[in-house]
Image (cartoon, rainbow, N blue to C red):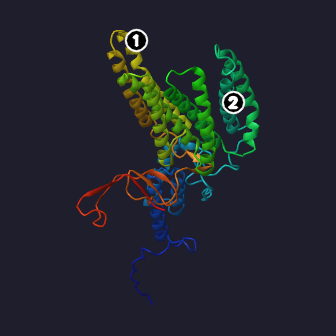
Amino acid sequence: MAASASAQPADPYAAPVNAKPGEDPVLNEQIAESLVQRAQELLDAKVYLDAKQLAVEAMVRSAHGTAAEQAKLIIHKVNVQLGIPEEDGPPINPPGGKLDLRPIQDPTITNLEQPPPQPVMVDEHGGGHVASMVHTGLYAGLIGTTIGSLFSRENPAAGAVPMGLAFGIAGGLYLPRLVDRLHWSEAQVRTVGSASVWGGVVGGFIADISTGHTTGREVLVGASIGATASMIGGAFYASSHPLSRGDVALVDTFAGIGALGGLTIGMLMQPAQGEAYSLNAVLGATGGIVVALIAAPSSNTTQRRMLRVAGLALAGGALPFLLYAAIHDPTTSGDERITGLLASCGLVGGAYLGFRLTDHMDEGLDTLDGKPTKPAGDDDAPPAIVGRNSDGRWGLSGIGIAPLSPALAPQKGMAFSVLGGTF
């Protein structure tokens, strides 16, 4: 018998006849869309490697759906950011139908995602040993110069120069062996060395302030005392508050800008006593160090970046002295005042320009033992200009203005918080 059969409507959510067991194209497309959405968030956050990994996984789930086009675009953007040629990237749909899902490595940045196999310790071939040679040589040379200057009152340089050279060479060759036994990282060595250098600078200026008519021997004694005390303090600080090499470079840059700025502001002030120049330099260097230590935990600075910032700041402060050579007049102090004002503005302007031009330089490379120096976790410091989080981090916490509590003051008013902390 012949019978007619009516066509039944196809189920749009049913798996295709040739689909593999357990595969659901609709579910795969939904998973791919979720992966692409998360990959886009990571791309916006500049976590390029993870974004590319998720985009490739989205291509695995749905190689021809709507999410696939978005995944291809994300992969292309990541390749552009990392400088990876498209033909050298991982194949999207290689022969055989299997994708390479091994972790994607950035060939230009080898230590960003994976920690180094060994901590960066001071060794005889690493940067830590070179840093210890430089700083121990400088410190020993300062001590030798100070001792040599005591040999003769009439001609201090006769003993200071040979003793300084001998102590400096011997210290640079032999003292790093003692530093090696402490097993410090390069950043810790640089922290102590930087403290010694700036302690010596500040100590020398303080000696000039306190003694009036200062001799070279008195400046050397003050510098030696300041360098020794700061070196000891720096060793305690480095053991409890580790800084990265970029943080130390930030401290050196700000301290140098502060010291030079104090001298150029002295030109603007034209004080009656020359010791005011030294006082300005002490205040400027100390202020620069304090600001840098507060800003270091939340900054992304490397030695290469800070070298450019310091160079532009120095250029901005030096250019006005070309004008000074043309307008110099020994009968008035107006030329010195103009030069001091322009040089002070040039230092600040050059530093600002340097930070702007290097805004995205070496992002993610400000690391300490292979880990980002910016601590993880929530910032729970109360609103204040300077705040302390519960994990011990100090930083700029914003501006906090709140009404006065009736329990503290009978009249109505507002409180402006300068310092706040959570413990």
Residue at 48% from the left image edge and 36% from the top image edge: 254
Quarter placement of the N terminus: bottom left
Question: In this image, 264 relative to 224: left or right?
Answer: left
Give the crowd class for mark 2: few <14, some 14-19, many >=20 residues within 10 Å.
many
The location of residue 138, given as percent across then percent down, is 65, 29
Give the crowd class for mark 1: few <14, some 14-19, many >=20 residues within 10 Å.
few
Q: Is residue 235 above or below residue 135?
A: below
Which quadrant of the figure has residue 258?
top left
The location of residue 369, given as percent across then percent down, is 63, 49
Residue at 55% from the left image edge and 45% from the top image edge: 366
Q: Earlier in the sequence, mark 1 or mark 2?
A: 2
Q: Which residue matches tag 1?
A: 325
Question: Which is in the foreground here, disc 1 or disc 2?
Answer: 2
**SS under mark 1:** helix
Residue at 41% from the left image edge and 22% from the top image edge: 273
Circles 1 and 2: CB atoms closer than 8 Å: no
Question: In this image, 188 relative to 123: left or right?
Answer: left
Residue 84 visible in image = no
Q: Which mark is residue 140?
A: 2
Distance from the alpha carbon under mark 1 to that under mark 2: 38 Å
Look at label 1 and name its amino acid: Ala
